[in-house]
Image (cartoon, helix red, strand yellow):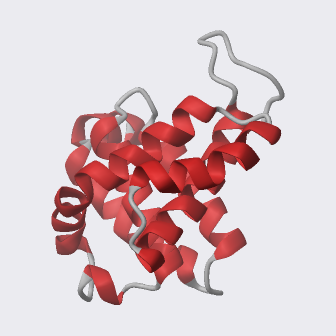
Amino acid sequence: MSRGPRRDGVDPVARTRSRRRALQAVYAMQLSGVDARNAIAQFAHEQAHEVADLEYFEDLVRGVGKHRAELDAALQPFLDRAVEEVDPIERAMLRIAAYELRHRLDVPFRVVIDEALRTVKRFGSEHGHTYVNGVLDRAAAQWRATEVQAARG
């Protein structure tokens, strides 16, 4: 991973940190029922100290909060169980990645999947990344079919 912003102004390291904090915030939302605004307030202070992309963090958390029902319904065909039965860390990451795949078309699908897998490997269950990978690969193939086809040649 390169250090510092790319030509388009995106700092990949800051985005990675933003996704990690977003995972924590979405996880907290799932467990405690706190809304996105309060989850952002709870984690924004830590986020700012990590030199992360605060705007991106807030977009992810707000996006998941606002679109949760739509994201869960969109993910359901790719799951082998109800969304609420998925491990809480994997569920939070799937919701964040689904938001990125469906609403952040500026982020390449491969980046979304790679970042989701790295994050779940770090915070999730031992084999959680395998499950998340299978779900997101199938979801990306449907939701971003043109982009996926172009990447496969």
In this view, the residue in front, 34 or 152, is 34
Q: Quadrant of the N terminus?
A: top right
Residues 110 and 6: in front is: 6
- Give the number of callouts: 0
Observer able to see residue 28: yes
Question: Residue 4 placed where, x, y %?
Answer: 80, 22
Q: Does residue 149 appear left or right of residue 9 in this picture?
A: left
**Residue shown at 28%/58% (left/top)?**
139
User: Residue at point 48% right, 75% down?
Assistant: 90
Q: Position of residue 114 (x, y in %)?
A: 57, 53
Q: Quadrant of residue 34?
A: bottom left
Q: Nearer the viewer, residue 18 or 119?
A: 18
Q: Residue furthest top?
A: 7
* Residue beneath the point at 39% across and 72% down: 33
| Residue 140 appears in view | no
**Where on the picture, by quarter, is residue 71?**
bottom left
Quarter-wise, where is residue 136 in the image? bottom left
Viewport quadrant of the C terminus = top left
Question: Relative to 122, is 88 on the left or the right?
Answer: left
Image position of 32 with respect to 127: above or below = above
In the image, residue 80 above or below residue 109: below
Residue 107 % position (x, y):
45, 33
Q: Residue at x 64, y 62 (%)?
A: 119
